[in-house]
Amino acid sequence: MCESQLPTSESISSTQESEPNKRMKMSVTASPPSVTLSIPSTSKSHASCLICKKPGPKLIVVTQYARVRAFLRKKMFVPAGSRCCPKHIADKEFTDDALQQMQQTNPDTNINRTSIVELLQQTREFALRNESIRLNFDDAKSMDNEDYYNLTGLTKDQFDELLSYLKDVDIRATKTRSVRTCIAILLTKLRCGMSNHLLGTLFGMQKWQIRRAVLTAKHALMLNFVPHHLGFSHITREDVKENHTRPLAKELLCTVTENPVILVLDGTYIYLQKSGNFTFSRRSFSTHKHRPLIKPMIVVTTSGYVVSVLGPYLADSKNSDAKILTHMIETNVEEIKDWIKEEDIFIVDRGFRDAETLLNDIGIHVEMPSFLPRGTKQHTTEEANATRLVTKLRWVVESVNGRIKTWNYLDRTIPNSQIPHIGDYVRIISAICNKFRPDVSTGLESDLSTAAKMRFLSKEVNVLKEYVETNGLDKRQVRWRKIDASDTSIAFPQLSEEEIRELTMGVYQIKLAKSYAQEHLDKDGTYEIYVNNDHDGILRAKLQSRHTSAKTYLLWIGFDEINIKSWFCKCKIGSRVVGMCSHITSVIWFLSFARHRENPKIGVRSWCSYVDDAAALPVDDSDSDEDSLVGNEEE
């Protein structure tokens, strides 16, 4: 052996010294077989249940998954090998009742290295799963009812009931999403109006996976859910008459011997992007809304139950509401001609006027607001009263349209690539509303008395209108004395909002009245009140139009110290006696109710101070003088 290869004394000594040191280091870093941690733990028993303490023999061993979930939710460690009754386990973990009954036996836990590693590994997997999946509809305990409703428009129980309509063959579960997740993605998209990119972030999926999930869920709901809750074939005429027709509608429109079906029809608007296809761009452009859109036709009952959704249709002049209804009848869509019968009543707006002849030919009665004859500025009292009877019932379809738009996807400008699916989306939402929402307007106990009152008043004349026109109170030469609306010397009756609602026969006028009164209270407002000493008990006011700055309306109110006797306004519908217009309501609401309150809520907040006004420019006196001189010279 070479000398260089022989071990030296230094190498021998270093080797001899390194072995003890190495053993010492290992003894310091190595942990004992088990350690004691300050974590509460339950009892460990093979013979009895750790929850209810009942003895076997049908006990099951608590799995590692259930033990980790109990630690995360209860902050209590369940020893390995512990057993419990099968009823305490659901979905592979302890039930809520079991966690509440779980009791601490020891304040500390003796846990070995293997259990610590398993606990850390399971906790890591839960953390990674929650990091990649922000919304987890598969875990029933991860979200409460409020979360479900905010995201999907349904409570947790309603969501589960919706899933009961679906079959496994319609939606195939994959590694990335379950059936619940698939339906949740579609409803979240419709409810929140989110893009597929954002949904992919929330659900931990790719954009193309979101798109496939939405289409799959839409197809399954259209096949198995929508036909049970939407369409003329899903409901009988008798069901509509008995369960979805307001008594108010029957009293106002039907005779004692008749029992027809009463339907309310109107189109809603789904706004679109501008299209590069010029033909479609022209056909989808609405001259009424001045933007591209398509129109689904909504057919509802007087209680707000959606009978059917037809279309969507184009929005050009060839697709007016009247032509859409004509197309529905002539093509017998959904076999509508077999469903409706003679003497049935359709409540529509003025846009359906060209279809009235067709409906009359097949025996359908049409109820429509009156038209203002050319050359006139105001409806007669009879026309205004008849219009109020119609609008008292027709508002429900507008409310249904608003309910559908609470699913924000349909309330926004939709990409043109989604046009093939819009009709299905509207039908799915309408079916959900029918199934899980109460009717917009239910029968009230006061319906019969309200209907009788409205029918009686509809035959009356406006005596104050005749008095004003006969005595020339609308002429300029009549002297009126201006007073402050807050003047308590005026002997105007004091009423509650409920009593005012009985006069207006609706709540819409009261809502607008507060905004009209707000403009009066502004320092630059034009809301003025006048009294005339020659005509006791008559008050005159002038209100600014909410639509046109150059237009104001004169109105008169007859009153005494106890009651409001009569009213008359110069607006289009101001001569009616079945209820009153918002202008008259504004004066009555302020004088009889608001001014007697300490801090009444009048109108809504004005945001003008937060926005620049280009009209508010400093005026140069010299320039204004020159302008006035030029004006005089021109005159």
Image (spheres, helix red, strand yellow):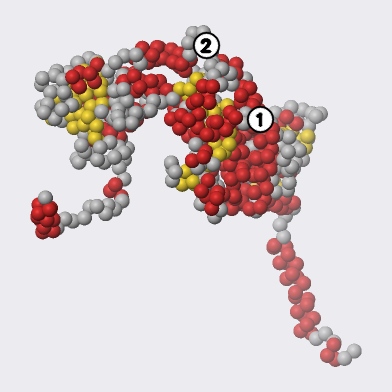
The vertical placement of 92 against 461, above or below, is below
Give 168 or 94, whichever is nearer the viewer.
168
The x and y percentages for residue 347 are 48, 24
Image-quadrant location for residue 489: top left
The answer to whether residue 377 is seen in the rendering is: yes
Residue to which mark 2 is pinned: 258
What amino acid is found at the position of numbered circle 2 in the picture? Glu
Q: Mark 1 Cα within 10 Å, few/some/many (few <14, many 20+)?
A: some
Q: CA distance from mark 1 to mark 2?
A: 30 Å
Q: Is residue 605 left or right of residue 164?
A: left
Which quarter of the figure is the N terminus placed in? bottom right
The answer to whether residue 263 shows anywhere in this view is no
To which residue does mark 1 refer?
227
Residue in view at x 10 percent, y 19 percent: 534
Task: Specify the farthest residue to the top.
Answer: 257
Q: Nearer the viewer, residue 275 or 177?
A: 275
Residue 80: x and y, percent? 74, 42
Q: Position of residue 132 (x, y in %)?
A: 63, 52
Residue name at image x 60 percent, y 16 percent: 238
Residue type at mark 1 is Pro
